[in-house]
Image (cartoon, helix red, strand yellow):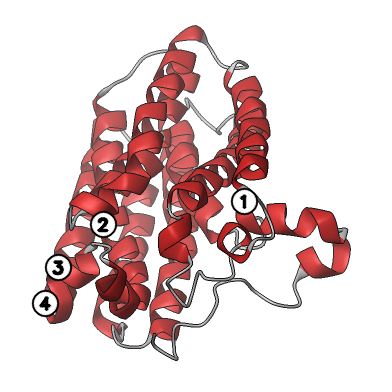
Amino acid sequence: MSEISASDIPKGKWVERLLPAPLRPYARMARFDRPIGTWLLLFPCWWSIALAADGWPSLPLIALFGIGAMVMRGAGCTFNDITDRDFDGRVARTADRPIPSGAVSVLQAVLFMGLLAAIGLAILLQFNRFAVVVGAASLFLIVIYPFMKRITYWPQFFLGLAFNWGALLGWAAVRGDLGPPAYLLYAAGIFWTLGYDTIYAHQDKEDDALVGIKSLALKLGARTRPYLYAFYAAAILLTAASGWAAGLSWPFYALLGLGAVQLAWQARDIDLDDPFDCLAKFKSNRLFGWLLFAAMIGGRVIP
């Protein structure tokens, strides 16, 4: 195992300070102490809500999707940990996660996942009927994703399919249908995910190769950088097409340009052999998410 592949569980954070000891493994399993994944799941939802709005996006929808992203990301991470428990125990970064470390049993994890999924369902049922159907359709992608790393070097593509479903669901929750802007935004999000999750996967490439897990980091290796440029360029072009199809005004394109600079910086500056830099660049996608959210709102409310 590589010495630089340190545990991904943060120490000394709010989970240890504020939660009773019996609850801490569950909070860690749901990644409540590592919110970047929630942000990456949430932003396509918020972008789509803003894209579909007639003016300012609905604050109740923003709040509901925020809670829903947190609990469904937690349920997804728990399911991923259940299916990957044998692999996780053999990778330095994940060996002390709650299930492989023995802090949580598989049965306890299943029950916890069911609780989170029930909360997510309660939130989904607040939307219109068409949006409920769209949301339910994402379950297939959620279920198959953890197994993709066993059979293809493109698991990042399947993560993109699942993690960007909110680009469709947000539009459906606002308008009760699906339109070209939502489909274009969904495609843009998939390419965005191909970029940021390939960066993320470079943290584990040595251990993944040892235990037999496939990823784009292993597939592309030293050729990763030009692919990052290509993935991110496609994400920007498809997002621009989405905004154009939705009739957004000039502030959208101005802020999207700043977002393009942020993505280009990631691809240019990344040290693919430094796990800590890979994690920092991965987390920097939160800034891109905020820039694009501001772009969608600005393009709607400013003539």
Q: CA distance from mark 2 to mark 3?
A: 13 Å
Q: Earlier in the sequence, mark 3 or mark 1?
A: 1
- Residue at the farthest bottom position: 3
Residue 202 visible in rendering: no
Marker count (numbered): 4
Which residue is rendered at x = 18% and y = 52% of the image? 152
Residue at mark 3: 219
Q: Earlier in the sequence, mark 2 or mark 3?
A: 2
As helix, strand or loop, the secondary structure at mark 4 comes to: helix
Q: Earlier in the sequence, mark 4 or mark 1?
A: 1
Residue kind at label 1, given as amino acid type: Ala
Residue at mark 1: 30
Q: Earlier in the sequence, mark 1 or mark 2?
A: 1
Q: Earlier in the sequence, mark 4 or mark 2?
A: 2
Q: Cβ–Cβ below 8 Å for labels 1 and 2?
A: no
Pick whichever, 237 or 44, lies toward us.
44
Q: Cβ–Cβ below 8 Å for labels 3 and 1?
A: no
Query: Residue 155: x percent and y percent?
Result: 26, 52
As helix, strand or loop, the secondary structure at mark 2 comes to: helix
Residue at mark 2: 194
Q: CA distance from mark 4 to mark 1?
A: 33 Å
> Is the residue marked by circle 2 packed among few (<14), some (14-19), or many (20+) residues within 10 Å?
many
Q: CA distance from mark 3 to mark 1?
A: 29 Å
Pick whichever, 178 or 109, lies toward us.
109
Side of 92 relative to 186 (left or right): right
Residue at mark 4: 223
